[in-house]
Image: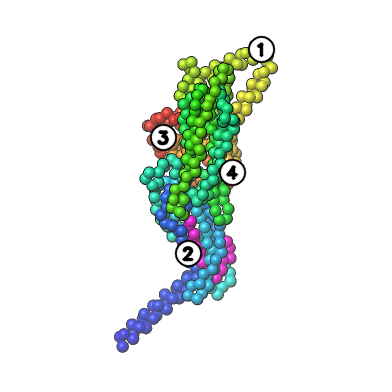
Amino acid sequence: MVGDNWKYVWGFLLLLFWQGAFAQGHLFSDVKLNQSSVYVGQPVEVTVLVYTSTWFTRGLDPGNIKVNGAFTVYFRSVSSSKQINGKTYAGVEMIFYVIPYDDEDILFPSLDIKVETPDEGGYKGVQRVIKIKARKIIVKPVPPGYNKTEWLVASGMTVKESWSGDKTRVKVGDVLERSIHREVSGTVSELIPPINWDSLSGVSLYPARSEVNNHKSRTAISASRTDGIRYLFEKEGEVTIPEKVLTWWNPVHNKLYKRTLQGFTIDVLPNPDLGMLESVRDSLAVQTAGQGETTGDKSAITILGVSLKWFIAGLLGLVVIIFLLINGIKPIRRIIIKRREQYRNSELYYFRHFKKASKRQDPDKAVQALYRWIDQLDLKEPTLQYFATNYGTTKMVREVKLLEQHINSSITSAFSFNFRAWSGARKNCLNGELQAADSRQTLWINPHC
């Protein structure tokens, strides 16, 4: 008899639980990862799923999702359906790519997503908030034996190399321009490492500003990067351009791929007109002003015991005086025009352009101007994150991560810049002062600003 009574009690409790679940159980969510452990730079496909046994009366907006320590790219929403216990559920799948850029574990955050759906048996949409649970992603460091500065995770890469100038006939004072263009699948441009140019004896190297682009379709991401260098040959004799090996790690095949650009030897011929060499050297120095120091033969940095900077200044002053003595005032106009062109290609010009755009409260133009200015600095790693980490404060690092989230979600209209922080970081960069977080006690000579 007692056993029968307990049956009735348990039956009553199950009935109450079933009724409560029925009232709330027509809506549920889930999060799926295509993999939970990845290398630095390896994308994780995160799918956020929301299902209802009725229907959605309004589209779902995931909002601006920020994942600390990673780039986040939102792809699209996909409609789906699912059978559970004989009942059909309508669903929406929101697909993201999360790409870690540090070797620390990351967390896809918990989310509160607003949905609008009617109750079962109803027809009018009711606004609700559904909880999305957080998911941890384990990030593995670059494997031992691999160069961290050249590490790149990609599903594929194509490389194109081009030269401007005759490589078969080179004399002292000649300049050869080299460009390496990479198209990379499955990553963003911020993670494509810059080309590491080899120093050559008797040759000065003048880097060109890099060009980067990101591309996104409904199903994939890709990026491109173009790096350039100008070789100024200053001594006769044989010069060997070494081979360049470009690598990328394919996570699907779990294999390292290489693309080799073959090296070759150039026989540099003598040139009796050494004055032309000085003119070319000055011209290249002016063109690369604001992009950092040249690399290569250290003897090219000083001329007749005078630093290259002061030598160029004195030479330009002498040229102006000669022009005035020979041709009068008329050449001044041409000099002014030339200087104006040089200024418009300088780091200062692009920084002031960024300043104007940020003060006008036009975030889209400010973001474009910001990237143009960062490219002019020719940093070791030409990314906003590298600049903020090395020259800005902790608050600025957080601002950059927030900005990147806005950019990845294609929503920058709500973003505002703390221009005073960017101005201070620029000053640190130009003065060669490295500050980690808020510490300003460590000084170094920065060759990249």
Span highlighted in magenta in the image? 44-59
Q: Earlier in the sequence, mark 1 or mark 4?
A: 1
Asked whether 290 or 400 is in front, the reply is 290
Task: Tell me if residue 49 is in the magenta stretch.
Answer: yes
Asked whether 75 or 393 is in front, the reply is 75
Q: Which residue is mark 3?
A: 435
Establish if 165 lies above or below 13: above
Secondary structure at numbered mark 3? loop
Q: Is residue 161 left or right of residue 151?
A: right
Establish if 445 lies above or below 97: above
Q: Residue furthest top?
A: 325
Q: Earlier in the sequence, mark 2 or mark 3?
A: 2
The answer to the question of whether label 2 and label 1 lie on touching residues, with beta carbons closer than 8 A, is no
Q: Which residue is mark 1?
A: 326
Instruction: Residue type at mark 2: give it.
Output: Ser
x 53%, y 33%: residue? 229
The answer to the question of whether label 3 and label 4 lie on touching residues, with beta carbons closer than 8 A, is no
Q: Is residue 74 visible?
A: yes
Establish if 400 lies above or below 430: below
Residue 91 image position (x, y, % from top left): 53, 66
x 45%, y 72%: residue? 21
Q: Which residue is mark 4?
A: 364
Establish if 414 lies above or below 336: below
Instruction: Residue type at mark 1: give it.
Output: Ile
The answer to the question of whether label 2 and label 4 lie on touching residues, with beta carbons closer than 8 A, is no
Secondary structure at numbered mark 2? strand
Q: Which residue is mark 2?
A: 29
Residue 54 image position (x, y, % from top left): 55, 70
